[in-house]
Amino acid sequence: MPHSPGGALFRAFEYASTYLDELNNRPVGATASLEQLRSRLGRDLQQESLEPDQVIAELIAATEGGHLGSAGPRFFAWVIGGSLTSALAADWLTSTWDQNAALYACGPAAAVVEEIAGAWLKDILGLPPQASFAFTSGCQLAHFTALAAARHAVLRRVGWDVNRDGLFGAPPVRVITNEHRHGSVDRALRFLGFGMRNMIALSADDEGRIRPEALQSALQQSQSPTIVVLDAADLNIGAFDRFETLIPLAKSAGAWVHIDGAFGMFARASRSKRGYLAGAELADSWATDGHKWLNVPFDSGLVFVRDREAHRAAMTLNAAYIASNDQARDQIDWNPEWSRRGRGFAVYAALRELGRAGLEELIDRTCDLARSMVDRIGALPGVEIIWRPHLNQGLVRFLDTRSGAGDTAHDLRTRAVIEAINATGEAFFSSSVYRGKATMRVSVVNWRTSQTDVDRTVAAVAQVLGRLG
Ligand SMILES: *Cc1c(COP(=O)(O)O)cnc(C)c1O
């Protein structure tokens, strides 16, 4: 039975506009419990069909209170960006057009929009213009894609064709990383068959960075094919490895250098922050996200690879029925998926909405707000600043001020205060463990966050501290 789609789509649109308008006044944390959500959503799947409008109305009602306010301005947990208005609208249109963005032939505009947005991004991020790229589901799959290219290249250099001969019997590949690397790096390495035993995690200095001597000595320990993974902003303190020093060391030892810049790569767009990434352009591959600092809806990872041939060899496939067009860019040559969403539209829209100046302003403003929030929360009684942001990430902890209280008591206090802040509905934070201490992470990544939101948040924290005593 063909339906007119209008009812359901109008309902979704009306609800979405109200939801976005009210973000500022809704509780930031979820208000529905696990049991409530299960009982509202969990019913037997009925036999008969329903009108789309009814399905959507009931979906909205059943999930009420079950969404975190991560789209809104006072959500500071993990590193989760919001969605710029044009990027959200482009994302709706992406579903409307419903292109299979695997090939130019299945979605010409979807292919071209990625080609253009990919070139813009290389320019903004200061990456080699000839680098290849892919739009993935997130940084996780961006790592997977880049490290597959790395695996191909470092084994090829020792005469091993991984596509033909696989990994069984291959020369061992070592991976050197920073102890503070994100878990998605380990997982990508697992997917690629490296094994954790072949990973060397270097301990970092007090600012979270690999020490050049430590890298040098690790490199000298073996002649095996080597991949070095460096951090462009870890999620606790936004630490950047010293690319200018480390990358030449790694390159002279013949290693492939990959950078995890899930959010930190975007600091390249700011003149005042760009210095942290000096030398990042010397790497071989770079992974980042559209759905964090660029404020594109989820399902937006980005990967760039200097050695196009290694990237293509690791990802492409030849099937007789693929209608490739030798002029256009087919995403399937660069991406790990087959059928896929047209991810370029939302990225293209976000970049157009912001422009270069708007992106720089977004990066600078969120960094300033993170610092101001950490300083002001840190000035409240019983609060210790663990990391004052130079970027958009900071750490504080809440002390148990009773005499004799030690780290365990401070950890308990910190977790209790975070829970109490989140329960106010005014703001939402997550905890982290940094150098053995429980902390509250302050992460500002949303384009909607303003000074007023920092004021409201600091007031809520002060009120909680006063109440808990
Ligand atoms: C978020 C994050 C990742 C993982 O990215 P996803 O987009 O969630 O897959 C990797 N590294 C760092 C530093 C991150 O912050």
Image (cartoon, rainbow, N blue to C red):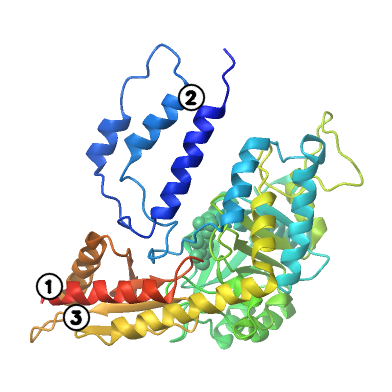
Q: Position of residue 229 (x, y in %)?
A: 60, 69
| Mark in the foreground, 2 or 3 | 2
Q: Does the residue labelled 3 lie within 8 Å of ligand 1?
A: no
Residue corresponding to mark 1: 467
The residue shown at (46%, 86%) is: 205
Does 253 sit above or below residue 8? Answer: below
Q: Which residue type does callout 1 highlight?
A: Arg
Q: Distance between the residues labelled 2 and 3?
A: 52 Å
Sequence-wise, which precedes: disc 2 or disc 3? 2
Which residue lies under the disc numbered 3? 399
Measuring from the top left, give residue 300's x and y in whole percent: 60, 53
Q: What residue type is labelled 2?
A: Pro
Camera-nearest residue between 137 and 228: 137
**Closer to us: mark 1 or mark 3?**
1
Query: Can you tell which quarter of the image residue 456 is in?
Result: bottom left
Would residue 186 be seen by someone viewing this image from the given angle? no
Q: Where is residue 143 in the image (x, y as percent from the top left)?
A: 61, 58
Quarter where residue 441 is shown: bottom left
* Mark linked to residue 159: none
Check disc 2 and report the residue beneath it.
52
